[in-house]
Image (cartoon, rainbow, N blue to C red):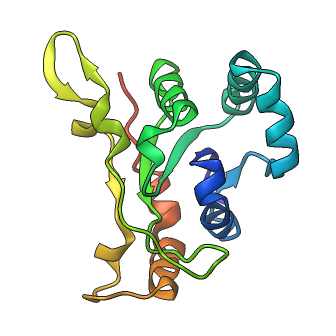
Amino acid sequence: MAKSAFISFHFSRDHWRANQVRNISALAGQPELPSNEWEAVKKRGDAAVEAWIDEQMNYKSAVVVLVGKETASRKFVKYEIRRAWSMKKPLLGIRIHGLKDSNQTTDSAGANPFAQFGFSDSSKTYADYVPLFDPREYTGLTSPTSNDIYAAIKENLAVWASSGYRRP
């Protein structure tokens, strides 16, 4: 395994897709949190969720945001991105909308979640620094299937994880 990584994603929408990436085993990620345990953490409130995120992220060497259709709008994904940035953890994104979900359907691409974080002294955003990899570009195909997307992620995940942006 290349490195340990905190895996950030939209839990309810992309859990199935995220597990496909986790199963590649190119990264040592945080333990999978079953949906019933996630719901139990959420019921304790935002502070409990943030504490869980902090605990999981503290000892990881990088943060990988798996970007689906609605990832950029998720409150806790935003928290995870801000937290990774403040901790100066290497940060990167991987688009996963081309992977099938549990219903065997793919999704449309979502917004770049790093583009919504700016700087007070510049017009730049995190997106100007943090790489967002699109596996479709690595397949060499005009209409890649879910299997093609998975193969591209599997082939490139360790290299991508080593390419995360670490702020000075």
- The residue shown at (60%, 38%) is 61
Residue occupying the far top of the picture: 120
In the depicted structure, whether residue 135 falls above or below residue 64: below
- Find the residue positioned furthest to the left: 123
How many labels were placed on the picture? 0
Residue 41: x and y, percent? 82, 31
Residue displayed at 34% across by 37% down: 114
Q: On the picture, is 14 further left or further right than 74? A: right
The quadrant of the image that shows the C terminus is top left
Tell which of 133 and 158 is nearer to you.
Answer: 133
Q: In this view, does 46 lie above or below 53?
A: above
Q: Determine whether, in the image, residue 150 is placed left or right of residue 21.
A: left
Task: Tell me: 19 left or right of 36.
Answer: left
Residue 30: image location, x then y, percent: 74, 45
Q: What is the x, y in percent for residue 64?
A: 52, 47
Q: In which quarter of the image is the N terminus?
A: bottom right
Name the residue located 40 percent from the left edge and 50 percent from the top edge. 163
Nearer the observer, 7 or 41: 41
State the image coordinates of residue 96 (x, y, percent, origin top left).
Answer: 47, 65
In the image, 133 versus 142, the foreground residue is 142
Q: Which residue is drawn at 65% across and 52% down?
A: 12
